[in-house]
Amino acid sequence: MQEKEKGGFSFINEQIKEKPLNKKRLVKKALFTVALAVIFGAVAALVFSLLQPEFSNWFYPEEKPVVTIPQDDVTETEEPSQGDIQEASEQKDTQETENDGQQGENGAAENNGSQENGEVGNSQQEQTGETETEQTGENVPDNDLRELELADFQKLQNKLYAVGKEANKSIVTVTGVKSDTDWFNNPYESKGQASGIIVAESSRELLVLTERKAIADAQEIYVTFINDVSVKAELKKYDGNTGIAVLSVKTSELTESTKNAITVAVLGNSLTVAQGTIAIAIGSPLGTNYSILTGNITSTTNSISTIDHNYSVFTTDIVGSSNGSGALVNVDGEIIGIVMQGYSSAGDENTLTAISISELKALIEMLSNGQDIPYIGLEVTTVTAAIEREYEIPKGAYIKDVCMDSPAMAAGLQNGDVITEIDGDEILTAENYEKKLLSLKPEDTVEVKIERQGPEGYTEITCTVEVSVLP
């Protein structure tokens, strides 16, 4: 019984051995786990790098830089006022009267034949002559008394060209590349070029002012700086009226050498420009990049009427190309005009014509900040006091023309109407109209009060105009 019992329960004494360790399999699992970790980390890093700007803008939104261009005032002119001229004229008349009186007294003394008076007169003349000589020697340098030579003229030219070379650092060449096909369905590329002006700079971008016609319908836009470095640019905004556009160039794509080679243009006060002012043309006035021409402003009284705006036009005696572009600068290197040959009259096709920069500053500021230019579609002029008296037209902005299919035409405005008020603001001049329009935004609805002539005289009418954007 004991043996059976021992035999029946013999399994209790058996030992279960653990499965032997497979090192190769363990190593494979470890490598597989490490590989998965590496792949997960790489994917996570890639996703984070792609979404990091979005997360940053989401949690820490970056404020967009705002470009501010100070507006100019005609009171900054250095020309003498009418009061100063009148005062100087009165002083001159007074001095002439006193001199005439003194001459009469001297003449009477000479007629009396007084030797003593004659000696005194000679003594006074000698003293006066010495005094005038001393004053002349103090006030007039010796160099100004000598005759100018050709070398002096060359020095003056060298100084003007030095100003132009420095100003050219703010000039770029804008190239618009368009892809097209010919009659035989062969693809080819065409390029349009124009000069551009660096008008503003922020931590993120350079802003370049140029003509839109050079980049119209372009698939790619390139900006070439004065050191022959080209980078891609993007169209920020353009004005369908004047045809000017602002391009954006990312500063992150600029090297340090390029940043050191360029400068931001200084926009001067063109309201003080007078006839005869020395002007330097920079950019490509002859169609050649970075050429420099010098001359004078021949007229500042010309103006052009465009849609919703009037601009002063400077004519010069500088012979340029009909396709020339660039800018006019003064002797201080400040830009006073944008060369736009499209606004030349029939007789000025061979000379450079520029639009006053002061009248474009508000427009440039809006385009630089990515804002659309409000559009109603009117050509207006100011009803002056003389016109008001002679033709009995109410004071305001006289409508010369209404553009086809414009918001003004849709609102019922007509040629010959006089705008007197827009949204409660009084309109007395064309400048008031332009300033009010630039303060509006596209899709704004405004109430425009006009005076319209009828059989019994002028009648006030109110029209509702929806502001739009000129394409």
Image (spheres, rainbow, N blue to C red):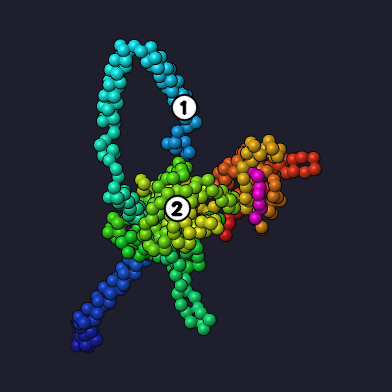
Please tell me how crowded label 2 is: few (under 14), some (14-19), or many (20+) other residues with Cα within 10 Å.
some
Magenta stretch in the rendered image:
396-403
Question: Magenta includes 295?
Answer: no
Residue at 47% x, 27% y is 89
**Residue labelled with disc 2:** 317
Residue 2 visible within the image: yes
Secondary structure at badge 1 equals helix
Task: Report x, y in % for residue 205.
Answer: 38, 56
Q: Could you tell me how far apart the alpha carbons at marks 2 and 1 are, in whole angstroms?
A: 33 Å
Q: Camera-side residue: 179 or 280?
A: 280
Task: Report x, y in % for residue 108.
Answer: 40, 14
Residue at 37% x, 15% y is 110
Q: Quadrant of the C terminus?
A: bottom right
Amino acid type shown at disc 2: Asp
Residue at 38% x, 62% y is 289
Direction from residue 251 to residue 394 in the image, left or right: right
Task: Report x, y in % for residue 313.
Answer: 51, 50
Q: Camera-side residue: 344 or 234?
A: 344
Q: Is residue 61 above or below residue 139?
A: below
Task: Report x, y in % for residue 351.
Answer: 47, 56
Q: Is residue 256 above or below residue 181?
A: above
Q: Are the residues tagged 2 and 1 within 8 Å (C-beta)? A: no
Numbered label attached to residue 89: 1
Q: Is residue 462 above or below residue 96?
A: below
The main secondary structure of the magenta stretch is: strand
The mark that comes first in sequence, 2 or 1, is 1
| Farthest residue, direction right | 455
